[in-house]
Image (cartoon, rainbow, N blue to C red):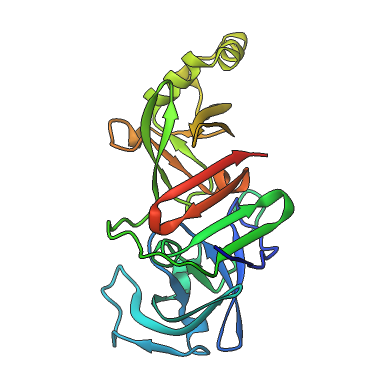
Amino acid sequence: MDFSLVPVTDNTFFNYIYLGLASNGVKLIAMFNTRGNTMVKESIAKDLDIKLLDTDYIDEKKTYKRAILGELLIGGLKLSKVPVLVAKDTAFDLGTDPFGNTNDCDMVLGWNVISQFAWRANPQEGRFEVQTSDFMEPNREKTNQPIINIGFNGRIIKAAIDTSRPLTIISPSLAKEAIDSDEEVRKTLEMLGESLEDITNLSRFTFTNDNKEVSLSSPQIEPAIEDTDIQVVFGADLLRSTNWAIYGPTGYIRLENF
């Protein structure tokens, strides 16, 4: 399997990853998003080879039109006739992060494209790569984001990866279990005189992936995912803080701390 380098841009907004892509000679900045569909800004679409499938927006809430993008270059990977959504520019307005940065991009590279290929990255080296050979048939099980199995406290649990979230979220019950099983974290809370009800973030969440221990700092405790099938949703912080590879068609994901 061969890989090609993909430029990583210097755009800064939360922990999001931004890539330099191109289409018909037009340079594009794309957010790498392991959820949902690929979207293009309406103001950018007029300069691209795009065939609209809808004459009007889907509805008042979903302010986008379905379309086919004639060409998309991702590093050395050239794609033709890519299904995309052409969305109003306001759909890309995500406000500001704590440092006042905004989501300045031309498009979102979504899971409908990401899931077709293999990807790998070393954030410390600024290296981001995409597969350019030995393609496999994509997984026929339809999901709008990757779901992986991780090891935690001697059992296997399911976790999602959603890089449209800047930070990882974890259910309160899983957070309590993580605290109870991590003596260092437990002692820190006891020293500070805090209980689980007092905190909104774990200092550390440790799990295994492919028989390797991986630790992630400061996941947020989120009551909304309590009693759901997936009680860990990894955000963009996971891909910023590990060496990783996503093999989309097989659903295999490898993670490793620096």
Q: In front: 127, or 183?
A: 127
Q: Quadrant of residue 59 in the image?
A: bottom left
Q: Residue at x 65, y 55 (%)?
A: 100
Q: Residue at x 54, y 59 (%)?
A: 119
Vertical relation: 132 (above or below) 149: below
Q: In front: 92, or 210?
A: 210
Q: Can you give x and y, in whole percent of width and height, for residue 176 in the image?
A: 43, 19
Q: Can you give x and y, in whole percent of width and height, for residue 11 in the image?
A: 66, 63
Q: Residue at x 52, y 82 (%)?
A: 44
Farthest-out residue, right? 125
Vertical relation: 76 (above or below) 227: below
Q: Is residue 25 visible?
A: yes
Vertical relation: 151 (above or below) 194: below
Residue 172 left/right relative to 201:
left
Q: In front: 156, or 163?
A: 156
Q: Residue at x 62, y 9 (%)?
A: 191
For the C terminus, the image quarter is top right
Q: Quadrant of residue 96 in the image?
A: bottom right
Q: Can you give x and y, in whole percent of width and height, for residue 99 in the image?
A: 67, 51
Q: In front: 25, or 107?
A: 25
Residue 231 left/right relative to 244:
left
Vertical relation: 31 (above or below) 202: below
Q: Can you give x and y, in whole percent of width and height, for residue 32 in the image?
A: 53, 61
Residue 202 left/right relative to 34:
right
Q: Is residue 197 visible?
A: no
